[in-house]
Every structure is written in structure tokens, then in C-alpha cells.
């Protein structure tokens, strides 16, 4: 039974969308991942395939017809040098790029965990309104402004060179990888804390009021009502930040840590060939592309969820 004065769609006297007399039915939705990528339908697949082949053929032709194509191929894409750089040979003075990438992965995982915790703490402090926390809020704001404004490479130099110079017991004797991870955590926590703040502000005030009306204290309302919704809203931007974090672990090599990029640099200096950098780039792509596609999938799922919630 209709509850309004207007007849339901399809009833007598009510125009059906897409029929004569009614508004046309227009949809920009795509069903299926292949349809979204290829444009939908068999003709879209054919056109997309043909255009892809044309673009790839043009790029290959430009490379092959360039006067220095052979030199670039030898310097950057030599199969022999790529394999030697991947497996390494310490007896000849260079390290394995394939083995060094594991240090990048370990630095990424440790830094990611610490960033999530520190950034959340900073965001909660900046969102607090308690008068006693005013000086801490000032410090948190200054922290965010400082590490968002200073380039990451300078933070790495400041931590990696300055902390050992302090000669502090138990602090100044750590490895360069530890100092590099510390710099990554300090810099990225400033950015991620702002992502957290955006997520906290995206939770409607009615949700907070509902939690308080149920008698939940502030800490329980934050834990069970506000944070779950905030984190769900910020997962895609968080993953985008961590894609950048995975790549920026290569900057730790400026301190002398033998990670993938540093191992590639050492190989290049030993044999005067840049194919080792191509190996490092491929390894980083293998790490970041799956995370990027996972991020795209989460963004698409969130878009569908929001559209479904907006449909009357």
C-alpha cells in the first residue's frame, strides 16, 4: 500500500522511467570489473584492445627508433646485469638487490604499525577539548606543522646523523635502519594524524549523542562508536599513504643501510651499469601494485555502499 499521494512506479497513470512520457533512465553504473575497465560490451572490448595495442606499439616504436635505444637497452635493461644484481656477489663487492628488498619490507611493516598508533594518539589529542590538555594540544599541533613542512630526506639526515652525535647511552648506538624507521615514523605520523582527524570529524554528531544517551562514558563512546566509523571512512586514504611509505623506505639508504636501492647503487658503481636500478624498480612495483589495486577495490566498495545508502 502506498503511503503517499503519488502512485507507485508502474501503476496506472504513473509514468515508468525510460518509457514514453516518463523521464529517460540514465545510469553511469558499470557491472563487473571488466566492464569498468574496458567500457562495457563486446564492441567496447574490441575498441579498448585495439587502442591499447596502438598505444603500446607507438611507445615501443619510439623507443626502438630513438638514436640511443641500443645504449639505453644495454645500460638499463641488460638481462645479464639484471640477474647479477638480483642475486648479488659479495666477493666482488656488491650485494643482492633481491635479498636487500626484505629489509625494505621489514622497515615498512614496523614503521606502519608505529605510525598507526602514534598518529591516532596525536589525532585524539588534537581533537580533545579538555582544558588540562591545552599545552599538549599546542605541542601536537607544532609537531604536525614541523614534520609536514620539513622534507623527509632532511628528517632522515637529522635523525640518522644527529642522534648518534649526541652519544646518549642506548640511543646513539642503534643501527642506521632504526634511525631510518624513526624518521619515517616521525614524518608520516604527522600526515596520517590529519587523516585520522578527518575520519573523526566525518562521524556525525548524532552518533556521539546517541552513544551518550545510552549512558556510555566518553572513552567507551570513542572506542565502540566513533573510532570504528572513522577508521572505516579513512581506510582508502590510509592505504594510499602506506603505498608512499613503502617506496620511501628506499630513502633510508642515504644513511648507508643496505636496502634495495642502496644495493642497486653499489652494483652500479662497481660495474658501471644501471640495470640494477631497474631490478629495484621492478621489486618495488611488485610490492606496491597489489596494494594499489586493493586500495582501488576498497574505494569502489565504499562508493557502492554510499550509493546504496543514498538510494531512496
Image: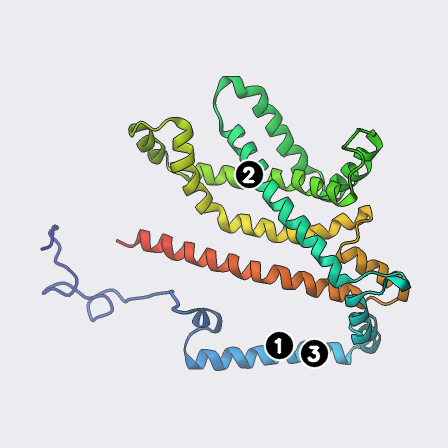
Is the residue 6 above or below the residue 156 in the image? below
Dot 2 corresponds to which residue?
A: 194
Percent x, y of residue 169: 79, 29
Quadrant of the snapshot with the N terminus: bottom left
Bin the neighbour count of mark 3 within 10 Å (Cα to Cα): few under 14, some 14-19, many 20 and up: few
Q: Residue furthest top?
A: 132
Residue 21 quadrant: bottom left
- Left or right side of 62 for 123: left
Residue at 47% across, 56% down: 298
**Of helix, strand and loop, which one carries label 1?**
helix
Residue at 11% across, 64% down: 11
* The one of 49 and 174 positioned closer to us in this rendering: 174
Alpha carbons under labels 3 and 2: distance apart: 43 Å
Dot 3 corresponds to which residue?
A: 60
Percent x, y of residue 86: 77, 67
- Left or right side of 54 for 267: right
Dot 1 corresponds to which residue?
A: 55
**Of helix, strand and loop, which one carries label 3?**
helix
Q: Which numbered disc flags the more N-terminal residue, 3 or 1?
A: 1
Depth check, mark 2 against mark 1: the one in front is 2
Bin the neighbour count of mark 1 within 10 Å (Cα to Cα): few under 14, some 14-19, many 20 and up: few
Q: Which numbered disc flags the more N-terminal residue, 2 or 1?
A: 1
Alpha carbons under labels 2 and 1: distance apart: 40 Å
Q: Which mark is residue 291?
A: none
Residue at 52% across, 59% down: 294
Instruction: Say how many tags the image has.
Output: 3
Q: Are marks 2 and 1 in contact (CB under 8 Å)?
A: no
Colour theme:
rainbow
* The one of 26 and 205 positioned closer to us in this rendering: 205
**Of helix, strand and loop, which one carries label 2?**
helix
Percent x, y of residue 272: 89, 66
* The one of 299 and 45 positioned closer to us in this rendering: 299
Amino acid at each position: 500500500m502506498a503511503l503517499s499521494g503519488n502512485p507507485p512506479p508502474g501503476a496506472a497513470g504513473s509514468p515508468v522511467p525510460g518509457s514514453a512520457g516518463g523521464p529517460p533512465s540514465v545510469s553511469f553504473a558499470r557491472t563487473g570489473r571488466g566492464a569498468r575497465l574496458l567500457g562495457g560490451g563486446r564492441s567496447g572490448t574490441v575498441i579498448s584492445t585495439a587502442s591499447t595495442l596502438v598505444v603500446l606499439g607507438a611507445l615501443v616504436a619510439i623507443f626502438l627508433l630513438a638514436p640511443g635505444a641500443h645504449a639505453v637497452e644495454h645500460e638499463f635493461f641488460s638481462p645479464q646485469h639484471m640477474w647479477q644484481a638480483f642475486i648479488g656477489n659479495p666477493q666482488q663487492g656488491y650485494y643482492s638487490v633481491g635479498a636487500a628488498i626484505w629489509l625494505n619490507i621489514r622497515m615498512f611493516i614496523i614503521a606502519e604499525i608505529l605510525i598507526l598508533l602514534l598518529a591516532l594518539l596525536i589525532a585524539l589529542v588534537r581533537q580533545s577539548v579538555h582544558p588540562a590538555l591545552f599545552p599538549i594540544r599546542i605541542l601536537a599541533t607544532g609537531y604536525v606543522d614541523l614534520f609536514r613542512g620539513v622534507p623527509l630526506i632532511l628528517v632522515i639526515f637529522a635523525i640518522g646523523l644527529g642522534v648518534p652525535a649526541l652519544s646518549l647511552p642506548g640511543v646513539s648506538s642503534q643501527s642506521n635502519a632504526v634511525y631510518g624507521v624513526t624518521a619515517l615514523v616521525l614524518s608520516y605520523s604527522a600526515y596520517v594524524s590529519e587523516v585520522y582527524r578527518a575520519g573523526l570529524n566525518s562521524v556525525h554528531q548524532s552518533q556521539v549523542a546517541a552513544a551518550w544517551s545510552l549512558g556510555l562514558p566518553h572513552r567507551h563512546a570513542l572506542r565502540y562508536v566513533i573510532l570504528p566509523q572513522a577508521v572505516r571512512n579513512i581506510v582508502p586514504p590510509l592505504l594510499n599513504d602506506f603505498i608512499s611509505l613503502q617506496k620511501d623506505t628506499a630513502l633510508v639508504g642515504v644513511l648507508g643501510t643496505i636496502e634495495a636501492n642502496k644495493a642497486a647503487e653499489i652494483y652500479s658503481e662497481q660495474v658501471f651499469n644501471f640495470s640494477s636500478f631497474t631490478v629495484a624498480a621492478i621489486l618495488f612495483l611488485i610490492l606496491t601494485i597489489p596494494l594499489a589495486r586493493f586500495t582501488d577495490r576498497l574505494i569502489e566498495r565504499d562508493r557502492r555502499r554510499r550509493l546504496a545508502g543514498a538510494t531512496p
